[in-house]
Amino acid sequence: MKTIASLLFVFVFSSNALAQLSCSAWPQWNNFKTHFITPEGRVIDLGSDYSITTSEGQSYALFFALLANDKASFDMLLEWTEVHLSEGDLSTRLPAWQWGIKQNQGQILDSNPASDSDLWIAYTLSQAAILWNERRYAVLSSVLAERIIREETAQIPDLGLTLLPGPAGFEKDNSWKLNPSYAPLFIFAQFAHLYPHSPWQTLHDNSAQLLIDTAPKGVSPDWVNYSVEKGFYHDKSAPATGSYNAIRVYLWASMMAEDAPYKNALTQQFKPFVDSIVSSGKVPLETNAVTGKTAGNAPSGFVAALLPLLAEDNASQTVTALQQQIMMDTRFTTSRYYDSVLYLFGNSALNNRFSIDKNGALTTNWSNECR
């Protein structure tokens, strides 16, 4: 009887251990860590001048670590970000956008913060505080959220409260340069829920309208200018091209809950783009927000980023064909940072590794299955 009982214990223990492992294991994340993250917690854009690290890279890696239930990596990434991009204190300084190795010395290369990265760091901290029951994350998130509102928004005539790409350098002669991909609506929705006495709901609604108004042909631009006299317009500094920035607009829209405000409006707005991909079977490298025309062939990361939106459109044949296309070119997952980031987002969204409700609250598969 003792032998049977012992075997039964081992079986139950092993089964529980495997269950815990299976609901948090994420091979693609482990691959990303191996190739792009140093043991100290720095995300490297391989092959870039000065082997740069951006606050964007740190923010996305924090989110992926949370999805993977990888708290050790999360804390390591957070510490590196705070020490090297925020001069040791995230609560007193928004992280610098770019850091790198120059003249054999690690240093900040561009001290201007990037609001999209700041949003993702603050958001991920807020959700980590809930999922891992860590109050210090919640406190830091609230301080960052307050600084974003204070330092990275502006009251723009006729647009109202608007997110700027950073604290400095995006306003000139009563004209503002804006980036639609910097505005994941679910983050604003969650902050409106967490901090109801701050103007996040206003920023959410204004940003949703900006996303719609800057994509009249169903495709979003990387950058757009705005002035009271001209409205939204494009020039050499902000051409109508949509590519490496704009790809995230569709990704963020696909991550919104079906019953989230503006979800249906955005889905309908981008329907021409989705239809063109289904019709051609190809994802373009570039789009033109003014004409709607497309050009070039997108890298695998772009394809992966669009799979969740295509899946929502019930374009199953197109999704399957594009998945096979990605499988034939997996070399990017060991050498191309940005493609790999888009792949992790697209892969995890498509495979329901997480969900985001209408208020922007994150649920991970491990938080559902591993408790």
Image: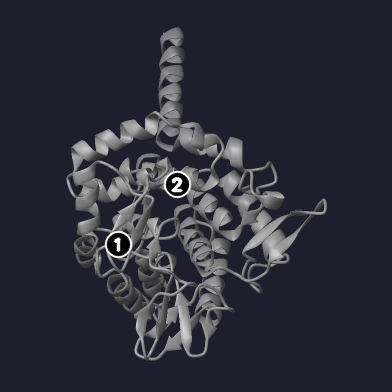
Residue furthest toward the right?
Answer: 104
In which quarter of the view is residue 370 placed?
top left
Residue 120 position, x and y percent, is 49, 61
Please tell me which residue is depicted at 45% across the width and 24% down the height of the picture.
13
Q: Earlier in the sequence, mark 1 or mark 2?
A: 2
In which quarter of the view is residue 98 placed?
bottom right
* Tag 1 residue: 219
Report crowding for label 1: few under 14, some 14 to 19, many 20 or more residues within 10 A (C-alpha): many
* Residue 190 falls left or right of residue 86: left
* Residue 110 falls left or right of residue 3: right
Please tell me which residue is depicted at 22% across the width and 51% down the height of the picture.
276
Report crowding for label 2: few under 14, some 14 to 19, many 20 or more residues within 10 A (C-alpha): many
* Tag 2 residue: 67
Q: Is residue 341 above or below residue 206?
A: above
> In the structure shown, which secondary structural element does the residue marked by tag 2 occupy?
helix
Q: Is residue 136 above or below residue 22?
A: below
* Residue 151 falls left or right of residue 218: right
| Residue 338 seen anywhere in this rendered image of the structure | yes
Dots 1, 2 in contact, CB < 8 A: no
The Cα atoms of the two marked residues, 1 and 2, are separated by 29 Å
